[in-house]
Amino acid sequence: SSSSSSSSSSSSSSSAFSVRFGNALPSLSCPANASQIFYSIVFDAGSTGTRIHVYTFIQRGPEGSPVLDDEMFQAVKPGLSAYADVPEIAGHTVAQLLRVAKRTVPALEWKRTPVLFRATAGLRLMPAHKAHALLQQVQAVLDESPFYVPADSVGIMNGTSEGILAWITVNFLTGRLARGSQKTAGILDLGGGSTQITFLPRSKKTVESAPADYITRLHMFNSTYELYTHSYLGNGIKAARLSALGALRSDGLEKEVFRSSCLPKKHTGHFSFGGLTYHVSGVNHGVRGFRACHQELLKVVKGFIKQPLELKDSAGFYAFSYYFDHAVEAGLIDETRGGAVKIRDFRRRAKEVCNRPPKRSQRSEFLCMDLTYIICLLKDGFGFRERTVLQLTKKMRNVETSWALGAAINHFQKFRIH
Ligand SMILES: Nc1ccn([C@@H]2O[C@H](COP(=O)(O)OP(=O)(O)O)[C@@H](O)[C@H]2O)c(=O)n1
């Protein structure tokens, strides 16, 4: 069977992907040796924001791989789930972002430039009928647009696709895929609602001991990769905050105050996620600080996150999204350059932030909680070591590290699931 890999809104299952570069692009009449430029539009509707990516690819000759030439990117906050009760605004959000596409893609190309809209954890976590109403508004706006919107262009992406597509992005941008190299990089993605881990296991035992639906075969550039991938819904960093606060199943009650030993003692404030707002505060009596906070966050991870066999001595993972943002916030890396960070660096900073009174320069009252969650997830969850080095990146070769580029490649090359 063949269908678009990322169009399914069902939960993940063991699957195989294949991508064929070269003889694709049926709409291109490309004379030999001539370069063709083509475009691809991808919407990433995350739990904390909606983003548009407009990619420009160059196809040199009818054979061979297209080369990514440029990316235009724009993001708006909050995510669409904030408009659960006013779905028209979801349509406006998309219409507003589409202007970027109209500015970037020459009008003559609009008709054959595909648009792909995929929602992630924010919509997965919503009641299905509300998510559907939002997607209908989006579909209507895209249908009216001058771009190419085939069936299945709008939907909720499953977690398996999200992890695989981000893995493709990183390994495509570092040139590893074109070489068919089996020396690839793993990826760690931490969103608001969900978190993904994807890597190519070196040992057969890792594959054999993993749950069947954590292993996916990917065929690409004449190579086959047997990837370990899983998306944990509810383990994104904002969902983890709610879980630590004990607010997960509440619907943003007016009066109730949710407390955590991870928040500064005298702090009272608000926290909004998924369209709901919660009252939060530090603990009145009792301990605050790293140890108490760590105990709270362990509960969010233990029994939920599975440890793949071989991560203990693994190197070569790229981490992005909220891993990156919080490393910047903690002063561990430079925002423009990114960089290598050990798990023990996260721990050292978490202890400082949690055990000392908050500095006035500190932007978020949640920094102690967020850093501590990252440590719990990486160490107690996935099983990385203190000395494990992660490459933290926001952009590679000036392109956003996210699943969106992988999805663009997937979409125009008609990835297939067998
Ligand atoms: N193109 C993108 C997309 C998301 N992100 C980051 O990803 C995080 C949020 O992920 P998200 O809202 O998509 O979360 P989920 O949908 O996985 O819950 C934030 O740290 C964003 O800044 C990014 O850096 N670049």
Image (spheres, grey):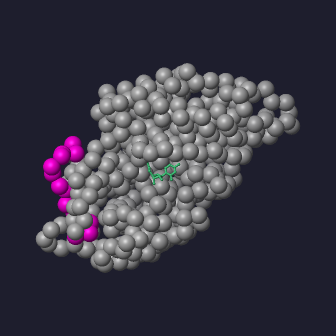
Residue found 44% across the figure and 57% down from its top: 322
Residue 38, position in %: x, y?
A: 71, 35
Front-lying residue, 365 or 207: 365
Residue 314, position in %: x, y?
A: 48, 67
Residue 110, position in %: x, y?
A: 67, 27
393 with respect to 250 (left or right)? right
Residue found 85% across the figure and 30% down from its top: 31
Front-lying residue, 30 or 177: 30
Question: Would residue 167 be seen by someone viewing this image from the given angle?
Answer: yes
Residue 253 magenta-drawn?
Answer: yes
When the figure is inspected, residue 280 is found, relative to residue 289, above or below; the finding is: above
* Stretch in magenta: 251-265
Residue found 44% across the figure and 45% down from its top: 77
Q: Quadrant location of residue 221? A: top right
290 with respect to 13 (left or right)? left
The secondary structure that most of the magenta stretch takes on is loop
Q: Quadrant location of residue 148? A: top right
Front-lying residue, 153 or 64: 153
Residue 87 magenta-drawn?
Answer: no
Residue 39, position in %: x, y?
A: 68, 36
